[in-house]
Structures are given as structure tokens and as C-alpha cells.
Amino acid sequence: MTIALDEVFRREAGRCTATLIRVLGDIDLAEDAVAEAFAIAAEKWPRTGIPPNPGGWITTTARNRAIDRLRRESTRSERQRESHRLHIDTIEPDHDPELESLDDFVDVVADDQLRLMFLCVHPALGADAQVALILRLLGGLETGEIAKAFVIPEATMAQRIVRAKRKLHDNHASYRIPRSAELPDRIDAVLVAIYLIYTEGHTATSGQALTRTDLSTEAIRLGRTLVLLMPDEPEAIGLLALMLLTESRRPSRTADDGTIVRLADQDRRQWDRALITEGHDLVVGCLRRNRPGPFQIQAAIAAVHADASSTESTEWLQIIALYNQLYVIRPNPVVALNRSVAIAELRGPIEGLAALTQIDPATLDDYQPYHATRADLLARAGRIDEAEAAYDRAIALTTNVVERDFLVRQQATL
Amino acid sequence: MPQYLISVCHDGNYEVDFSTPEAQRLGTQVGAFNDDLQKAGAWVFAAGLHPASSATVVRSSGGVVSMTDGPYAETKEQMGGFWMIEVADLDAALEWAGKAAAACEGPVEVRPAQG
């Protein structure tokens, strides 16, 4: 029962909070109300069983409790009415929590989730705060869990979340779906924030383990939600495909002892075929819309990798072409770096290094993968002294223990 | 409707010389921005300020008022001017702030008023 409730909570908390913020016009009140409703559920459901629409039940219960409380505490209610800053539209599904079919309700809830996503990535918030708010409000993660995932003290994370919520409140941020003129930038911010959560889970910035599965899983769940909410947004589909295809390689990325296995050395039979198939279908589906964007192209690159049975049989020419296309849309040095890796695979380390020299080193001097890539290519080209120095720089920039061990071992083989 | 302070971030030592073509150009831009604000009904109040070196700090302690020369904040950056606007929400305020930054060709800061 406890496990079932936990699952319901993970699945429904974000949706319920999203709706309650609209109904109550206040993030903190909404969070308290949802927590209270889940506490009631924990007490009641073991006796009655889980209702047919647990999310609807939680939302209605939370709303009723919150409204009761606001009525009881009349002074607070007065203040509350004044601070209904986030409350913009007043569509409120008046539904019976025990109903089985709540189609209209579900539509409104979808809008609420989008509103909440856009609120969390408001440009007035810093990237750290955006990610923390998404995980807290949409992911339903406890502050302690988020702090643990980012390896920072819980008090620091709590302060970050409180400050972000307070900034939105004090600044009278609206709870609404952005106008079409602002929409592209805001969608971009949502995509980038979800991908940031994924990549942190894929290669943790610091700590003892290479990956943090909980963050990757949560990012993929958010990605799926976003695709449901914005079925016509090819970049949302591209992001989900990219995450699924990258995730498919997780089982082979580390050896039994936790050390890193390079793409070239990975046992591709361990790759998750179900994730590859799903990611593949998504890539094909979104590219067909002919509105390519950075996430779709990166997903296509991941799909080419997934198709190959080995590094040697990988269609490097196609990968280079995709990187070229990506560079046209996003002419940044990281894309150029990844392209030079593909060039090295196709034409050897000397050509790869030549491609690398076209990047202004100053732009990537603090970027660990630049030095790690350069070190590897220099070593393969037989330029040992330079490789040694490049490894030194890469190791100095690495805060993840597993990644650092890997680089130290690579350097030792020179 | 909520009110926001849009303040112009300035180097404390800026000179106010309205005779230069540069200052006149900025003045025209800011004037047009002010007109837009008023037409939209978002205008509450605005002013450009003399340099921070013209400031006096006044304190009151136990009924005794004392004064010292110079600005309170000891930073190089000082408020060079400000607008008080009244708009629907943060996004509207930020949109006006973008136009303000373009008009005065420098960064501006947006802060919500209490209440």
C-alpha cells in the first residue's frame, strides 16, 4: 500500500500542484494543500482502496481543504485575496472526486501543467532555481532529495527554492501560458531545463557515482509529459528521443566495478533495445515534420550511434553531416568539438586535431571534455608530451570521482 | 495593479552635459519611451537624477538628525534615474524594462513595489 501511494504521489503530485496553484493563486498554499490531501489519502485509501481517478481525488480534496481553511482563517483569507497574484483565469473544473471519467478536467489539468512549466522557467529566475523548482513542483521531489541529487546541503537547496518562489510571488508573476510571440523562447527554456536535469543524471557534476538514475528518470518522465502537453512541438519530441536513446546505453557505460567504459569499448548487446526502438520512432516522426531543431538533430545523431553494431561500422559520415547541420543552427564551440571527434573516427586523429584547431581554445579553456578529447586525440597521434599536459588540464577540471579515475588511468597508459 | 521600479544602472561619475549630441539623442529616445508609457497608461512617475556625488545622507538617531556628504552606497554603480510603472504583471514590467534599456542604452533593474 505504501508503495502504491508512493507511485501515485510521484505520478500525480505535479499535476495536482499545478491545478491547485491556479485555484488558490499561491504556490505555498497549493503545496501545503496537496501534502495535506496525500496525508488524508494515506490514512483513508488502505481502507477504501485507491479511487478510480486518484489525481482528481487528491486535487478535489486538496482544494476543498484549502478553501475550508481559508474560510476559517478569515484574516489570512483577506490577505490571500489580496495576494491572488498568480490567479489569472478562473476556469475551475467542478467535479466529483469519485467520478471515473473526467475528460474535461484532464484538459484543464494539462493546461495547468504547462502553466507551471513556464512559470518554473521564468527568465527572471536563474538556471539553478529553474531546475530546482521544476523538480520540486512538477516532479514532486522533496527538497532533501533534490539537494542530494545536486550534492549540495539541504539548507542551501531549501533557501534556493524559497527564494525563487518568493521572487515569483513578490514580482506578481502571472500563472499563464506565454503569448505566441514569447512562446519559442519559453519553450526553449523548458527544454533546456529538462535536458539539464537529464545530463546531470547522466554524468553527475560531482560525487562518487558516475550517474544519478533518479534525475535521469525524472527528466524522461518530464519529457514524456511535455510531449503529451505539446504534441505539435517537434523539439519536445526530439528532446524525449535524445534522452531515451542516450539512456539506452546506460547499462554498458560503466563496468561492474563502476569504472567508465568508452563508447568504442561498450558491449552493445547490453543496450536497451526497447528504449532504442521508441527513441528511433520518435526521431523519424519528428524529422518528418521538417522543422528541424537542435534537440531533433542531436537525437538523430544518437539514433545513428544506436543503429551501429560497433564503432567501426558507425555511419560517421552521416554523423558529421548532422553535426554540420547542427552547427548552422547552433554555431557554438561545443558542437564543433563533438564534430571533430566524429571526424577523428572517420579520418583519424590527425584530421580530428586539425578540426579541433579551428576552435578558439579560449572559448573552451574551462570545458573539461575539450581537454579530455584533445588529450585522447594527441595520444592517438603519438604526441605524448602534449597529451600528458592536456590530461593534466582535463583532470584538474573534473569533479566527478569516476570520471577523474578514468582520465588518470588513460594518462597512465601514455 | 502592481507597481514596479525600473532603475537605470549608472557609473557613479557620469557627467550631465545635455549639450552634447550624444546626450540629446539619448534624451530624445527616453522622451519617446516616456510618451509610450503614458499612452499605455503604465506611467506613474519618473525622473533622471543628478550624479550620486550630489547626494546627502541623513540619519535620525534618538531624535538627533545628522547629515553626511555623499551617497549611502559605496559602490561605483549608482541609480542614474528611474521610472515607477503600473502594469498587469511581471512579464509586462519586463517588456517595458527592455524598452527602457534600449532607450537609455544601458542596463536597467526591475523591482516590484510592496503592497
Image (cartoon, grey):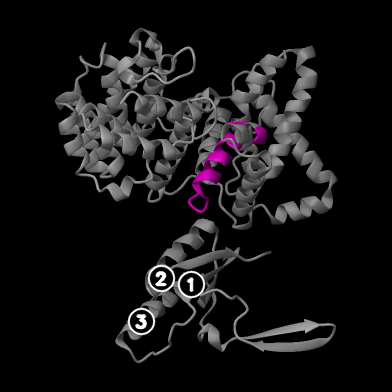
Q: CA distance from mark 3 to mark 2?
A: 15 Å
Does the magenta portion include A142?
Answer: yes
Q: Secondary structure at mark 2?
A: loop
Q: Quick one: quadrant of the C terminus of chain A? A: top left
Q: Amino acid at mark 1?
A: Cys
Looking at the magenta stretch, what is its main secondary structure?
Answer: helix
Mark on residue B9?
1
Please tell me which residue is depicted at 43% across the width and 34% down the height of the picture. Answer: A195
In this image, A357 relative to A42: left or right? Answer: left
Q: Amino acid at mark 2?
A: Gly
Q: Which residue is mark 2?
A: B106
Find residue A402 and report its horizontal and vertical position in percent: 47, 26
Q: Amino acid at mark 3?
A: Thr
Q: Chain of mark 3?
A: B
Extent of the magenta region: A120-144
Q: Note whether residue B1 is visible.
A: no
Q: Chain of mark 2?
A: B
| Crowdedness near tag 3: few (<14), some (14–19) or many (≥20) residues, C-alpha within 10 Å | few
Q: Earlier in the sequence, mark 3 or mark 2?
A: 3
Q: Secondary structure at mark 3?
A: helix
The residue lying toward the viewer, choosing from B36 and A274, is A274
> Residue A70: which quarter of the image?
top right
Q: CA distance from mark 1 to mark 3?
A: 19 Å
Q: Are marks 1 and 2 in contact (CB under 8 Å)?
A: yes
Give above or below for B95 relative to A17. Answer: below
Q: Chain of mark 1?
A: B
Please tell me which residue is depicted at 61% across the width and 44% down the height of the picture. Answer: A90
